[in-house]
Amino acid sequence: MPAEKIFQTVIGWNLDGMYVIIEWINWREVCLVRKNILIICYLILLVAVAIGGFWIGRSTADPIAGTTFYATVKDIDENEFLVNGLDVNDINNRGEVYFSIDSKTKLEWRHTEITPADLEIGDTISVTYTGEVQESYPRRIVNPVIMVTLLEDEK
């Protein structure tokens, strides 16, 4: 009998009152089937974790619709700001821009809420807004902005 063969017995009747059926099974085939089943289970688990992570991330994310540009603060007058758009922005968001904030505007630095008093002249910020922009000089964002994020490393 080859070493890679194993057998499985099923008890039935034989001459001594017991019948034994011996079925020869190739051990290598059994290992391959087990290995394939294990790989399929791992793939199913991987897909389930990926889908679960996607849906959890999607439900916890707070998407903000609107236009975002980067600027340096030139002047602050309580809740009104004059900023200068950086050169990394597209052509429509460069130059001086005037905007205001209200109680609904989210102000943050490194995912920590800040106040308008934390912003200083010369700070680099990102501004997210929706709505119209008056084409004047300086340009003016008509509606209060949605979010202002301080981009400085240290505060």
Image (cartoon, grey):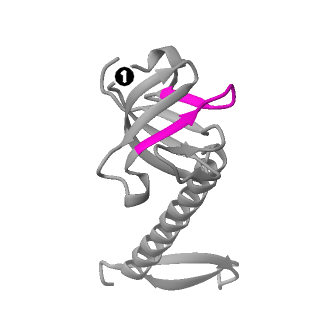
Residue at (53, 76) in percent of width and height = 8
* Image position, residue 28 (x, y; %): 36, 79
Closest to the observer, 121 or 28: 121
Q: Is residue 102 left or right of residue 27?
A: right
Residue at (66, 28) in percent of width and height = 102
Residue at (55, 27) in percent of width and height = 80
Closest to the observer, 33 or 111: 111
Q: Is residue 143 left or right of residue 33?
A: right
Residue 105 position by quadrant? top right
Image quarter (top left, top right, bottom left or bottom right) of the C terminus: top left
Which residues make up the magenta segment? Answer: 96-108
* Image position, residue 72 (x, y; %): 35, 34
Residue 79 position by quadrant? top right
Which SS type dominates the magenta stretch? strand
Closest to the observer, 95 or 3: 95
* Image position, residue 90 (x, y; %): 38, 59
Q: Amino acid at mark 1?
A: Ile
Residue furthest front in the image: 137
- In the image, residue 116 above or below residue 94: above
Give yes or no for residue 76 being in the magenta stretch. Answer: no
- In the image, residue 101 above or below residue 38: above
For the residue carrying disc 1, how many other residues have a C-alpha within 10 Å: few (<14), some (14-19), or many (20+)? few
> On the image, numbered disc 1 is attached to which residue?
121
- In the image, residue 55 above or below residue 62: below
Q: Could you tell me which secondary element the residue under label 1 belongs to?
A: loop
- In the image, residue 117 above or below residue 150: above
Q: Is residue 28 left or right of residue 9?
A: left
Residue at (30, 26) in percent of width and height = 153
Image quarter (top left, top right, bottom left or bottom right) of the N terminus: bottom left
